[in-house]
């Protein structure tokens, strides 16, 4: 009788685990396509000199959707953001421009923090407001690898 009870108990536990597990759906931005790329940046080259300073940033036009913004957060931590405004379909005005430690969209004058990617001045019309799209970045002794 105990073996039968153990078997039933194990089946119930197994069903509970299987049925109780659910994945949260990944909330992809519906406006931004998933572009695959990889680019290495050598920080010793003059082209990337701004990235040698905390708070420095550069725009790389030929990767991502409308380009990528790379930001030096702390001297050793770098962030890479898609340079397309994430709150509407890409169009002629949706390429972000760098203004100090902010990225700005000229369509609706949205401002984003390059330190966090957060939308700083959301409109009530946005449901939900979307932050900047983050790209993976790794630092290999002065060579930054950006990828998606």
Image (cartoon, helix red, strand yellow):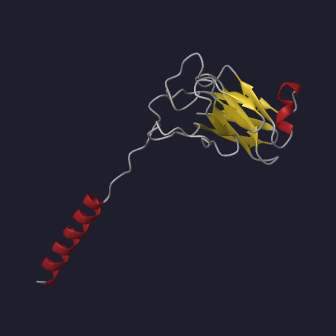
Query: Which residue sits at x=54%, y=18%?
Result: 91
Residue occupying the far top of the picture? 92
Expressed as whole percent of the image width and height from the top left, the position of residue 107 reads 58, 24
- Residue 58 falls in image quadrant: top right
Q: Residue furthest front?
A: 124
Looking at the picture, does residue 19 appear above or below residue 137? below
Pinpoint residue 39: horizontal percent, then vertical percent: 69, 28
The quadrant of the rendering that contains the N terminus is bottom left
Looking at the rendering, which quadrant does residue 106 occupy?
top right
User: Which is nearer the eye, 33 or 4?
Assistant: 33
Q: Compare residues 138 and 10 and report the one nearer the observer.
A: 138
Closer-to-camera residue (6/143):
143
Query: Which residue of the protein is positioned furthest toward the bottom in this rendering?
Result: 2
Residue 21: where, in percent of width, then height? 32, 58
Q: In x, y percent, where is residue 49?
A: 87, 31
In the image, taking residue 95 as reference, residue 129 lies left or right, namely left
In-image side of 80 versus 131 (left or right) = right
Residue at (82% x, 39% y) in the render: 142
Residue at left offset 76%, top offset 45%? 73
Tag count:
0
Q: Is residue 21 left or right of residue 29?
A: left
Q: Nearer the viewer, residue 143 or 51?
A: 51
From the image, which quarter does the C terminus lie in?
Answer: top right
């Amino acid at each position: 009788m105990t073996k039968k009870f153990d078997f039933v108990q194990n089946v119930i536990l197994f069903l509970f685990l299987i049925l109780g597990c659910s994945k949260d759906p990944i909330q992809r931005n519906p406006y931004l396509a998933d572009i695959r790329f990889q680019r290495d940046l050598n920080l010793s080259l003059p082209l990337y000199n701004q990235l040698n300073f905390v708070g420095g940033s550069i725009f790389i036009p030929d990767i991502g959707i409308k380009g990528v913004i790379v930001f030096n957060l702390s001297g050793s931590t770098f962030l890479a953001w898609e340079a397309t405004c994430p709150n509407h379909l890409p169009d002629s005005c949706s390429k972000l421009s760098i203004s100090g430690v902010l990225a700005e969209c000229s369509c609706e004058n949205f401002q984003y923090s390059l330190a966090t990617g957060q939308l700083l001045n959301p409109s009530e019309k946005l449901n939900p407001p979307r932050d900047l799209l983050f790209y993976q970045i790794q630092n290999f002794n002065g060579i930054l690898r950006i990828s998606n």
